[in-house]
Amino acid sequence: MSGWEANVRKVTPYIPGEQPDDADMIKLNTNENPYPPSPSASAVLGGMNGGRMRLYPDPDVRELKAALAEHFGIEPGQVFVGVGSDDVLATAFLTFFNGKKPVLFPDVTYSFYEVWAELFGIPYERPMLDDNFRIKKEDYLRENGGIVFPNPNAPTGVEMPLTDIEEIVAGNPGSVVIVDEAYVDFGAQSALPLIDKYDNLLVVQTFSKSRSMAGMRIGYAMGNKRLIGFLNDVRNSFNSYTMNRPAIAMGTAAVRDDDYFRMICQKIIDTRENTAVQLRRLGFHFEESKANFIFAAHRSVPAADLMQELRKRHIYVRYFPKGRTQNYLRITIGTPEQMERLFAALKEILGEEQA
């Protein structure tokens, strides 16, 4: 080992979903939106003045914050923006999870939570979901240094009722509770109405899923002004210019095109419900999803085998090989045409496996 390696921070990094480059692929492994962004957002990008790229972007991102505040009926001072919700969540971990008591998040959830906790030296515990992959609210009504969970949860797609979320927030006045709503626009109920009632609640959302802008990296958090102020203080302590000009302009245009946003979300919801029917006919079982994916296991064929067979046919789904998730596939909802190709491939595979 080289001498300088003794001073290196060694971590086990988060592993994102595979990004294949197949010409004829059906990519259902990273929960991307299969439809393009709002035409208004694309038009803004095409009309941007390249000469302005020599100037720093607005460090306060006022235009985008104002659009988000208007959309949600809150004040701009209640909005924090960052480079994707991962950036927002990492900043929130740094800002609010600094005590000696453990932060709580589920045992089956977004795996980046554990990575950030390890990276920042934050103690944590992972209460187990129940047998139906549901969060047990009682596990979060005990001493802790903070709470974070997605709603709907990932990779399960299961929604927690808003009444349970409120009970957790109200029961932890000494901790910040972060509700990660990356998938909320696909049929779940947002905790946003609670932010004016509880000063310890932070709601995080993203443009990556429902707004078809994963490539622009835009995320945001909403809460009371004191919470947002603390986030800004930490962000400005290491990078004041987190968002670039194209992202700000495109994000603002996308927020203002509400009709397109709602239309795309409904198309995905409709396709998800049809996908659920087709998968059950093929022998899969799963909990009801309120996300843009379904987390499913087959009654007789192992998930690892299905994943490999689909891959041979240039169809990519996400497989989590460890622990309680090792027999499940997370299948992103694509276009109706993409899902029909998936169903045809599964019928072929299951016919071969069960012959």
Image (spheres, rainbow, N blue to C red):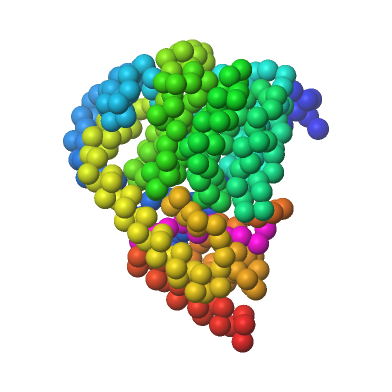
* Residue 13: % across, % down: 64, 39
Q: Can residue 20 be seen in the rendering of this structure?
A: no
Q: Is residue 329 magenta?
A: yes
Q: Is residue 190 left or right of residue 349?
A: left
- Residue at the bottom extreme of this rendering: 355
* Quadrant including the N terminus: top right
* Quadrant including the C terminus: bottom right
* Residue 29: % across, % down: 50, 56
Residue 355 drawn above or below residue 236: below
Q: Which residues are magenta?
A: 326-335
Q: Residue shown at 62%/80% (left/top)?
A: 353
Where is residue 213, by image quadrant?
Answer: top left
Q: Can residue 99 be seen in the rendering of this structure?
A: yes
Q: Residue shown at 45%/70% (left/top)?
A: 278
Q: Residue shown at 44%/21% (left/top)?
A: 197
Q: Is residue 67 left or right of residue 167?
A: left
